[in-house]
Image (cartoon, rainbow, N blue to C red):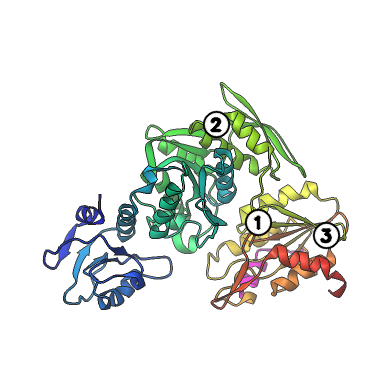
Amino acid sequence: MTCGEILKELLLSRRGPDIPLPDGVAQDSRKVVPGGVFVAVPGSRTDGHDSIPQAEKTAAAIVLVREPRRYAPGVTYYFVSDAGAAAALLFRAKYGSPDKSLKLLGVTGTNGKTTTAFLMRRLLGEERCGLLSTVVFRTGKADLPATHTTPDAETFFSLLREMAQNGFDFCSLELSSHALAQRRTAGARFRAAVFTNLTGDHLDYHGDMEHYYQAKKRFFTELLSPGGIAVVNTGDPYGARLAGELAGQRRVATFGSPDAQWRIEELQSGREGLSFVLRSRDASLPVYSNLIGAFNACNLAGAILAVMDCGVPFSQIDDALRRGITVPGRMQFLSSPSGAGFVVDYAHTDDALRNVISTLRPLTRNRLFCVFGAGGDRDRTKRPRMGLAASSADHLIVTSDNPRSEEPEKIIGDIVSGIPQGASFETVPDRRAAICRACALAGPGDIVLVAGKGHENYQEIKGVRNHFSDAEVISNCFEHKESL
């Protein structure tokens, strides 16, 4: 179907005379072409309705709106109940419905999305599978820096088309709650959908956990193909709820709990990786991986079950896992000349911090340090919880993450309010100085967790993104420790 044909199906009511329906579509007013369609999509921080005057100035023929506005002569306005979904359906048509040529495997949840997406791509075969992740977009040509966990509708469908044109059979991708709430991927059909877990995050946007959960649930009720499979971690309370609500509506494979269809048994975890048996009533699959941390057993189980349902034999999966995998900024180890170990991880919620610290504790022969902060202009409710979760380390250095428009000291104060009395901590607002402080303190047998930014190579302060990499700063501190 063309954009014009899709547009006809979207109309609920309209204003203006009958005119030909064009195929040109944009949701960025700067990309509107004369005689084209502009979709006014409300976003997380901006509203496309505010850009209608620019679209009118460019002589758009049609503007899709959700809210009544003042109208300009010569422009036809159509009212749609969901502008985000309308934009996605139009872009899907514009780019030739590329999801029909690819098997899409997606993952959603609070923690573990990136690792699971990387795993699914590795298990499917990297020469056959594209990737859309928080870290990077891979379409078969040059790697592209990720702009969002899940990109806007136009970028999403254009990247899928590029993957299909480059001969890929699959795409492994992350689905964020913002993208699901805003319907950025509406119309796409997924072969497999994985649910990892749900813990407090993004409540500044969703309002409460129920709305957060409902946004995630959309992936399974709106985007999963009727013949596709939902792979759900029922060891998480929200996962157990989701599996129950999907029963009878979708095929569901469960893991992570004692009563799941697939159980994680004989789990062993150490510095060299982890092993476990993924067992069902009819099968026992021995799993070995270089990934660190018992929590990664659930990420592995979800990825394995999703790709097995797509026909990948376990022998191929086992071979891929034994070759090892590195997920940028996820439990990334660096060894210092002093004998201390440094770990860079993206953990930026209280649950993620708790999991990583509990993983590192038995690997620590002396003291466990944690350097961390919280993002500005984001969910403030999780900051005290992060302070409490991190307090299980021996010493905390509370610093900046991406302060954005907020003052770092205010964010740090919110975190410190959750640190229990008697816990050992200090505050160093400058992140570079905080990491160097940890380098100066850490000695043989110590482990330092530097959490929150992981793979990111920037720090956003007052609207400016400055180059900043935790791993680079740590390495520089190693080289210049004598000057600290």
Mark drawn on residue 336: 3
Q: Where is residue 119 shown, x and y percent of the image?
A: 59, 43
The disc, 3 or 2, on the residue closer to the chain's N-terminal end is 2
The answer to which image quadrant residue 373 occupies is bottom right
SS state under label 3: loop
Tell me the crowding category of disc 3: few under 14, some 14 to 19, or many 20 or more residues within 10 angstroms, Cα based.
many
Q: Which of 444 and 171 is in front in this view?
A: 171
Residue at the image point whose x is 56% and y is 70% from the top: 376
- Alpha carbons under labels 3 and 1: distance apart: 17 Å
Mark 3 or 1, nearer chain start:
1
Disc 3 from disc 2: Cα separation: 42 Å
Residue 269's image quarter?
Answer: top right
Q: Name the residue under label 2.
A: 260
Marks counted in the figure total: 3
**Residues in magenta, as a range:** 410-422
Q: Name the residue under label 1.
A: 329
